[in-house]
Amino acid sequence: MGDMWVFAVESGHVPGMDLTGYSVHATDGTVGSVDRQSEGSPFEHLVVDTGMWVFGKSLVIPAGLVTSIDQSARVIQVACTKATVKGAPVFERDHDTRDPVYLGGLSTYYTSLVTTS
């Protein structure tokens, strides 16, 4: 995996692409849908509404985990399992996506999984 906080060129992401409403699929099933995204910042990411799967919470997924974007099907594939996403540091408020401590925790979490796999 390249930079965790940047969409990979091979993902099919185009700068300015609105991913709101796209379904997010992990390697073993659907995680939820994109509620909003951050693009062009040092920490590009998706905020994903999980619906009732994780008790109605939202999760932050770093852009670097996106492996493909199917525009016609409106589906985003990510390079991790549902359990991996569910186990990530809890996202509680929009301020978290600008908090270097929270983002650092996400980096540490996902990087540790990649290096131990």
Image (cartoon, rainbow, N blue to C red):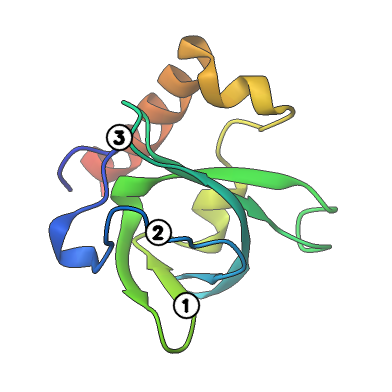
Position of 66 relative to 75 (above/below): above
Mark 3 or 2, nearer chain start: 2
- Local packing at callout 3 (Cα closer than 10 Å; few below 14, some 14-19, many 20+) is few
Q: Secondary structure at mark 3?
A: helix
Q: Position of residue 91 (x, y in %)?
A: 66, 32
- The residue that mark 1 highlights is 75
Give the residue type that dot 3 points to. Answer: Thr
Position of 27 relative to 93 (above/below): below
Mark yes or no: residue 27 visible.
Answer: no
Q: CA distance from mark 3 to mark 2?
A: 12 Å
Q: Say left or right for 18 vs 47.
A: left
Q: Position of residue 23 (x, y in %)?
A: 57, 73
Q: Say left or right for 32 vs 78.
A: right
Q: Residue at x 55, y 38 (%)?
A: 88
Choose mark 3 or mark 1, whichever is in front: 1
Q: Are marks 1 and 2 in contact (CB under 8 Å)?
A: no
| Residue ranking furthest to the front | 16
- Local packing at callout 1 (Cα closer than 10 Å; few below 14, some 14-19, many 20+) is some
Give the residue type that dot 2 points to. Answer: Cys
- The residue that mark 2 highlights is 80
Give the residue type that dot 1 points to. Answer: Val
Q: Secondary structure at mark 1?
A: strand
- The residue that mark 3 highlights is 111
Mark 3 or 1, nearer chain start: 1
Q: CA distance from mark 1 to mark 2?
A: 15 Å
Q: Are marks 3 and 1 in contact (CB under 8 Å)?
A: no
- Local packing at callout 2 (Cα closer than 10 Å; few below 14, some 14-19, many 20+) is some
Q: Residue at x 76, y 54 (%)?
A: 54
Q: CA distance from mark 3 to mark 1?
A: 24 Å
Position of 54 relative to 26 (above/below): above
Q: Say left or right for 3 vs 89.
A: left
